Image (tube, rainbow, N blue to C red):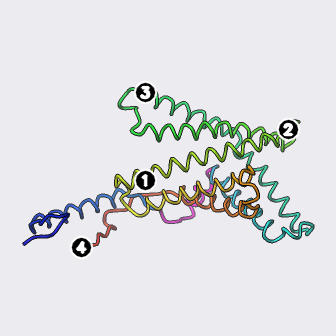
Amino acid sequence: GGVWAGGFILPHHISFHHKEEKRRRTRRSMGDQKHLLPITLGRLASHLNSLSNKDKVIKIVQYTAQAIQHYAFDDFKTDPRARRINTLFWSLVLHRKLFRYMNSLSDLVTIHRLVNQLKSHDSSETTTDKVDTALLLAKTCTFFVFWLLDNAVYLSMGKIVDFDGSSSAMLSFKLWLFANVINLIRNVRRYVKEKRDEKISGEEKSLDLELTISKDIADIVVALGFSKMAGPHISWGQIGIAGVLSAVLHLYLKWPRGRMKRSTLRVKHE
């Protein structure tokens, strides 16, 4: 007697060992898998103390105001509440630019590191995926120029320097769009590659990649809207909704992870 497997009849003792090995691999993958840590006041405070995460909290308020302005007051622009919401929105636009001031320095460090990785012939320093590194480098270079223009727009909006930053703003939006498209291509490629290679061992890690791709798409919608490259097809309110979604996904994806204790693992037997 035996078990049918892939066109062959396997003896029962081979089938048994095959199942045991599969269970062991499942236990190992679940043990290595990182999971969201429970919400505590300390973790929440630490999470929101990050400058990037603070920016995303303000981004949620900013883009919520934008969506409300479009869907609730688009036909009532003279309403005092509409004016207050409009003032809130543009005030937060300006304040968020201050949060992100000199982000180009961080990108410059990353560019230097990635260029060295691509040029390196040392097997211990050479990256395993040159294409992924090249895509990351292209995205980072684009963001580097975007931040420089964004900082210039901030100086113009804050009346710190006397020049019209509107043309720089439109170019920066187009660069932002280009960077997000590159990031989407990179993350989709990572997702397909990891699925193909069966490197995604659990549902949560797969979900994180899917949510990262969703965030990329939301950022592309926002950039398309602000850059006017989609014409009238993306409304002010849709930009607001996409911006809120992107910020919420960022905060979720940056929440601290930890490994499950093996004592808590449960493997469902066949």
- Label 4 environment density (alpha carbons within 10 Å; few <14, some 14–19, many ≥20): few
Q: Is residue 211 above or below residue 267?
A: above
Q: Amino acid at mark 3?
A: Ser
Query: Residue 130's quadrant in the figure?
Result: top left
Mark 2, mark 4: which one is toward the viewer? 4
Circles 2 and 4: CB distance less than 8 Å? no
Residue underneath mark 2: 160
The range drawn in magenta is 36-51
Mark 3, mark 1: which one is toward the viewer? 1
Horizontal arrangement in the rendering, residue 149 relative to residue 214 (left or right): right
Residue underneath mark 1: 192
Q: Amino acid at mark 1?
A: Val
Residue 127 in picture, x, y percent from top left? 41, 36
Q: Residue at x 6, y 72 (%)?
A: 1
* N-terminal label among 3 and 1: 3
* N-terminal label among 4 and 1: 1
Cα gap from disc 2 to disc 1, whole angstroms: 47 Å
Residue underneath mark 4: 270
Circles 3 and 2: CB distance less than 8 Å? no
Residue underneath mark 3: 120
Cα gap from disc 3 to disc 1, whole angstroms: 27 Å
* N-terminal label among 3 and 2: 3
Q: Secondary structure under badge 2?
A: loop
Q: Which mark is residue 201?
A: none
